[in-house]
Every structure is written in C-alpha cells, then in structure tokens.
Image: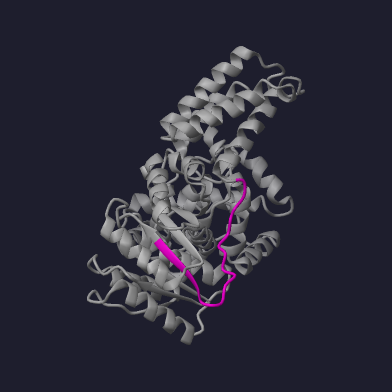
Amino acid sequence: MFENLTERFGRALSNLRGRGRLTEENIKDTMREVRMALLEADVALPVVKEFVERVRGQAMGEEVLKSLTPGQTLIKVVNDELVKVMGEANEGLDLAAQPPAVILMAGLQGSGKTTTVAKLARWLKENAKKKVMVVSADVYRPAAIDQLQTLAQEVGAEFYPSRPDQKPAAIVRNALTEARKQFADVLIVDTAGRLHVDDEMMAEIKALHAAVSPVETLFVVDSMTGQDAANTAKAFDEALPLTGVVLTKADGDARGGAALSIRHITGKPIKFIGVGEKTDALEPFYPDRMASRILGMGDVLTLVEEVQKKVDQDKAEKLVKKLQKGKGFDLVDFRDQMEQMNKLGGMAGMMDKLPGMSEVPEHVKKQVNDKEIDRMIAIINSMTPQERRFPAVIKGSRKRRIAQGSGTRIQDVNRLLKQFNQMQKMMKKMKGGGMRKMMRGLKGRMPPGGMPPGGFPM
C-alpha cells in the first residue's frame, strides 16, 4: 500500500536521520524532494503547497534547529503534518440513533460499493456486535441484487430482497419497515453507481436520502483514482450531506494521493479503508497509523489488533507449550502456521505493517509469495497423517504420490521439505531461550530460500 510514496519519502528523509545539525540548504533540498514525492503520488496541488509550507515553516523554527537531534525532530514534524492532513484521529460511525440506524452508501460505478456493504456488515457484526440488514436499491446493474444476496449470506447479515422493476425509494422504505420488524440494529443501503453530473441519478439518491434519513451517508471511492477521488467526493457532498468516506482498493494503490487529498478538499473524514478483496479486508482508518506506514515506520498497533482478533490463541498456546517441552515441530504445526499467516492477510499484508520494511531490498520482498503458501498447504494436505507427523519417511515414491495429489511437481515437494527443515531448526531455538535465541539465530537475515512461510509462532 502506497509503496511509491513510502519509497520517495524514505529517500527524501534518509539524509536527515541522525544529523546533529540542519542548514537552510539541506532543509530546502529535503522539502523539494518531499514536494516531488507528493506530486508523484497524485496528491492535489493545494494540499501539497500547504503541507510543504507548514513543514518548511516548522523546520526553520527554533524547536527543530536547536534540538539535540534536529533530523529526528524534523521527521516527527513531517509525521505530525501527515496526520493533520489525513484528519488527526479515527472518526467512527455514529450509530447513536433509534434502531435501525441507516447507513446509505453512495459512489461512482465500479468503486466497490456492493462489496464494501458486505465488508461493513461483517465489521459491524464482529466488532460492534450489531444485527445488520442489507438491501440493494441498485435496479440498473444486472445481478447487483443477486451479488449482494450472496455476500450477505457469506458474512451472516440479513438480506432484504428487492427486484429490478421496483422503484429505489419504495425498496428502501420497505426495507426500513422490515428492519424494524426484525429488530435489526443497522440497515445498510447499497445504491446504484452514478456520476455527479447525471442530474436524474443525483435526484434519485437525494430522494433515497429523504426517504430513510440515514445517520451515516458514506461515499465509497476507489483510492487508485488519486486526487480525482477527492474531487468527486466534493461534488457528491454538494448534493448529499456526506458524513464520511470509504477508500477501497488501497492494497493496489502504490501512490496514496486519495488518502492525502480527501480530508483537505472535502472536509470529510475517511472512516474506513479497504485493503483486499475478502470480506474481512476492511480496516478503520487511523491517520496516525497511516502516516507511520507512509514514513516506513510500520503499523504495529493494527498488526497486534489483527493477531488478537484473527489468530487462534488456543493453537498458538499449545504450540508454544509443545516447543517448550522439547517436542518436535512437525508438518501439522507448519501447516497451522501458514494458515494463521493467511488469516492475517499473508506475508505481503504483514510486511506492510512491520517497521523498517521500506529499507528491505526489493529482491528480498519479491521472495514473499502468498500463492506459494497456498501451494505448500495443498502439498501438506496431500500427505498421510503419518507423513505429517514423521516427515523423515517421505522418500521418492511418496514424493511422487504427494506431488500428484496436490497438482504440483516433485521439486515443489522438495522445496517444502527444505523450508520445513529450516523452520524446524528455528523452532528448536524456542526451547529454553525462547524468542531471543530464535532471533539471534536469524541474525537479522532471512534464511536461505526466503522468509519462512509460516513466520513466527502465532
């Protein structure tokens, strides 16, 4: 996420780290680099100008120049200004209303509204313990209603059926009545994609808004559209009283222009950010955590929260106890580790949140391949219980059978066994000395063959 911006910022600020003295000249050079980094990230020009001026003003101030660590102090100034640009703090959903609280989703075609409705329903169900009903008022796109019904079943939300021959305003009024009958806490309304220049469609969504008086009107926008995302959000806000923005497809956005432009241009907070295709890939937007990611300092808080929420704590505890007792780490444990890693968004998802990953060479990052993890799980699933417990028995004919059963090659099976052996050696270091011994064994480097797909005991 926002890799290009992180890389450019890293280059611009790297010369300042550890400096005992800053001059007007190197501050000027750094600000030029920061300005170029923001423009290349497709951040809106007014935002770039104001950001650079504010940072430059503070950089030339006594607090930075007379600091014992002026380089670090200036980096903190950049961090703080990034947070301000994106909105200071996370602004949650305001659901303090007589149930059902209605959330209306608006946006352009193809921005990911329907998927976001399902993601939000799941998030509300799992994190806010709400009973959620969803309804589609999109009577124009073929299969839009069916798509939402399928997603609702997947996330465990109530679905109110609608038909393409119905009027959108009638659909949402009927859905609201049904949501009251079923004692739903929240009703999320999916709407058709529309352009702000389409007067007829904008009139329709205004009528929808009037029909259900939503407590939240969220604008769903594709982050890869850059500063255009902010401009379309502003245009929609002039027609509808938006309460916030959901940025989708952020995992595929290497630039970050939308995240840095929207709050400044619209005055509306980014409330959520979509970080993948799966229905659990929705995160509340924390400006301070995002600024930390952009500056290559990771986002450990979000990572810890995900581990607490998604990792099977009982399995993790059993594995640690098993290792402490000196019992062997086998392929069943190895598979469990890889499955836990997948729950956290795979290695690529985790690397995005680890501090210092911007300094890891690109060829090392490319070793991390989440599809490889799925392939390795498939290979282990093709083994017999005995082979998983006692990998030493896996020889020639067994390897052929396992490769055939998993749709892979014998070389893939050999690679898995090699990586398992590396992981097994690391896990032996857990006995007695714990994690410290294991980290010392790594010596700050990845083992041969790339990062162990299972990562560390979860």
Give the side of residue 258 with respect to residue 389, left or right.
left
Residue 175 is situated, as x and y percent measured from the top left of the image, at: 39, 79
Scheme of image coloration: one colour
- In the picture, the quarter occupied by the C terminus is bottom right
Which image quarter: residue 379?
Answer: bottom left
Q: Is residue 78 above or below residue 186?
A: above
Query: Is residue 351 visible in this depiction of the protein?
Result: yes
Give the side of residue 244 with respect to residue 26, left or right.
left
Farthest bottom residue?
A: 181
Residue 99 is a magenta residue: yes
Give the side of residue 374 with respect to residue 163, left or right.
right
Query: Is residue 414 visible in this depiction of the protein?
Result: no
Q: Is residue 332 above or below residue 446?
A: below
Residue 164 is situated, as x and y percent measured from the top left of the image, at: 24, 74
Number of numbered markers: 0
Which image quarter: residue 205?
Answer: bottom left
Q: Give the residue displayed 57% in from the left and 64% down from the top.
A: 94
Q: Give the residue displayed 64% in from the left and 30% down from the top.
A: 75
Give the side of residue 347 with respect to residue 21, left or right.
left
For this rendering, which residue is in front, 358 or 385? 358
The stretch of residues the image draws in magenta is: 88-105
- The chief SS type of the magenta part is loop
Q: Is residue 378 above or below residue 226?
A: below
Residue 448 is situated, as x and y percent measured from the top left of the image, at: 50, 40
Residue 241 is situated, as x and y percent measured from the top left of the image, at: 46, 58
